[in-house]
Amino acid sequence: MDTFLNSFENTLYWILNMISFQVNWSKNYFWGLIVISFTIWMFEIFIPWRKQQKIFRKELGLDLFYMFFNFFLFALIINGVYALIGKKVHEYGLSMDSFTVINLKEFNPILQLIIFFLVSDFFQWITHITLHRVPFLWKFHQIHHSAKLMSFPVHFRYHWMENILYKPLKILAIMLLGGFEPEQAYIVHFVAITIGHINHANLKITWGPFKYIFNNPVMHLYHHAYHLPTHKKHGVNYGISLSVWDYIFRTNYIPEVDKYVKLGFEGDDKIPKTFEKQAWVGFKPYKRPKIE
């Protein structure tokens, strides 16, 4: 209990210090998120891809709440849980170095960041596929896919259980890369948030020839498409920041682009409309609709 409460207190002070500008701008995740979000929202307002889409759409408030809940409020609890797990790991005489596969200690700092970014993104890509293909996990991930319009805050519209599923893999990526300097991770963090926001934004960006490397709003739009080919029935375009994994493993799919393509999935009308009810979605029996 002491370990959990200490972590809760430290996380709370961390959040409050960021809000009150007592944390350096380069590592201020709270205001960094706001600056990135506001900037991309301005692009959505002045150069929207889908011009008929409302700026103040119906679910904007819900999506914004998800953004701050998943990134900050839920951290108060989940960080305490990970503190308990970390304590048990140390009790068994294990450390971060016990799992090292690639030691980055002698690598150039920039190369360290690039390798960490690649490994972390690949682990998240695998997790994303798992969320779609394992029925139990899909029950939680369907909250993200219940969005009927794409806009930057949809990036963080996901069930709180996904925090539990994704974060351990990010930690595992760090554990596999010995010698990595954690204080540099904020660079990867802000890059990933920016790319993720852009991918969900009402913007037409393809990155030209770099589309085979970086994910983009056009590609990700079809990840959220309601209708998919039968042979792609479990999903397409799973890339988080990078699209390269989809092209390598042939999970890519971009037909003739329809910017107003219907979004969602069969049965999405049964998803509750409020956060309080959505928080419990996934803990009730659910059968994925059969696809003819």
Image (cartoon, helix red, strand yellow):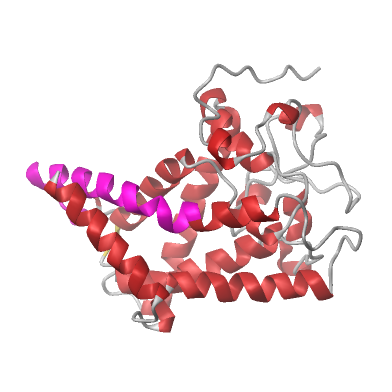
In this rendering, would 90 be left or right of 190? left
Q: Position of residue 257 (x, y in %)?
A: 89, 52
In this rendering, would 139 be left or right of 117? right
Q: Residue at x 55, y 65 (%)?
A: 193
Viewer can see residue 98: no
The foreground one among 206 and 135 is 135
Q: Residue at x 46, y 38 (%)?
A: 161
Viewer can see residue 15: yes
- Main secondary structure of the magenta stretch: helix
Q: Is residue 135 magenta?
A: no
Please, is residue 197 above or below residue 63 in the view?
below
Image quarter in which the N terminus is found: top left
Q: Position of residue 198 (x, y in %)?
A: 68, 65
The foreground one among 224 and 292 is 224
**Magenta region, residue range:** 69-97
In this rendering, would 205 be left or right of 67? right
